[in-house]
Amino acid sequence: MPLVNSSLVLATSLAVALSGCMGSALTVPEYASALEGATDVYIAESQALSGTFHRTVEDEVARIVREGADDALSEATDITKREMVLYLVLLEDAMSRYVEHLSEIPPPGGVEEEHVDYLDAVKSVRGAMPATRSSVDSASHLDGIEDAIAGSGFQDGQLRLTTACQSLEESVRAEGTGVDLGCTRSATNS
């Protein structure tokens, strides 16, 4: 399903779910449905961004190799840095929309703490984006780009994000409703 249609479906389902519950928590099934909808949209968008990043870098590097660039490694580094910085800007924007959607979903009492923990974990990863972009932009070689990501708050936040996601899934299931938040399929695990 195209992302625009997914966003429309999400907005409609959130509006319907929230219209009768303004200011009050949703039932567990309503909450799970709204949460999965918001998460599916975010994951689809972030995976599309990741795919675009990888394809662009591969295509551009293949082009400079075909053209026999004198300093192909330097050009590959510049391309990778440019595209990684762009990817992180766009991913931060997608995460901001996800945070907004999560913030609009009133959790039932039995999962409220886990919802807040998950929301905080997403915000933490999003908050690490500017410093990560700066580190990537300062890298002088391809290994430096990898090191910038590996040593970043963005990467460090992934474990917390996955743990909080799994905890939220388990809490919703403990309340009697199955939910799949794709804790291990998020594109932020790039």
Image (cartoon, rainbow, N blue to C red):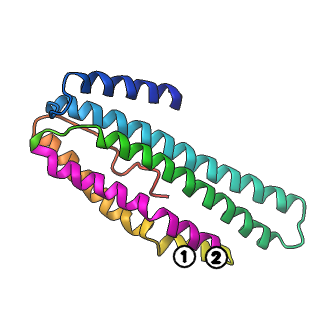
Q: Which residue is mark 2?
A: 139
Q: Earlier in the sequence, mark 2 or mark 1?
A: 2
Residue that numbered label 1 is attached to: 147
* Residue at far front of view: 23
Camera-side residue of 124 and 78: 124
Residue that appears at 61% across and 61% down: 85
Name the quadrant containing residue 141.
bottom right
- In the rendered image, residue 14 lying in the magenta stretch gets the answer no
Task: Tell me where residue 43 appears, x and y as whole percent.
Answer: 43, 43
The disc labelled 1 sits on which kind of residue? Asp
Location of residue 117 with respect to 15 vertically, above or below: below
Left/right of residue 68 with respect to residue 79 in the rendered view: right
Side of 60 where 92 appears, left or right: left
Amino acid under disc 2: Ala
State if disc 1 and disc 2 touch (CB < 8 Å). Answer: yes
Q: Nearer the viewer, mark 2 or mark 1?
A: 2
Within 10 angstroms of label 1, few (less than 14), some, or many (20 or more) residues? some
Q: Residue at x 55, y 57 (%)?
A: 88
Residue plotted at (59% across, 54% down) = 87
Q: Position of residue 35 (x, y in %)?
A: 29, 37
Q: Main secondary structure of the magenta part?
A: helix
Relative to 189, say whether 47 is above or below: above
The image position of residue 182, as x and y in percent, is 35, 45
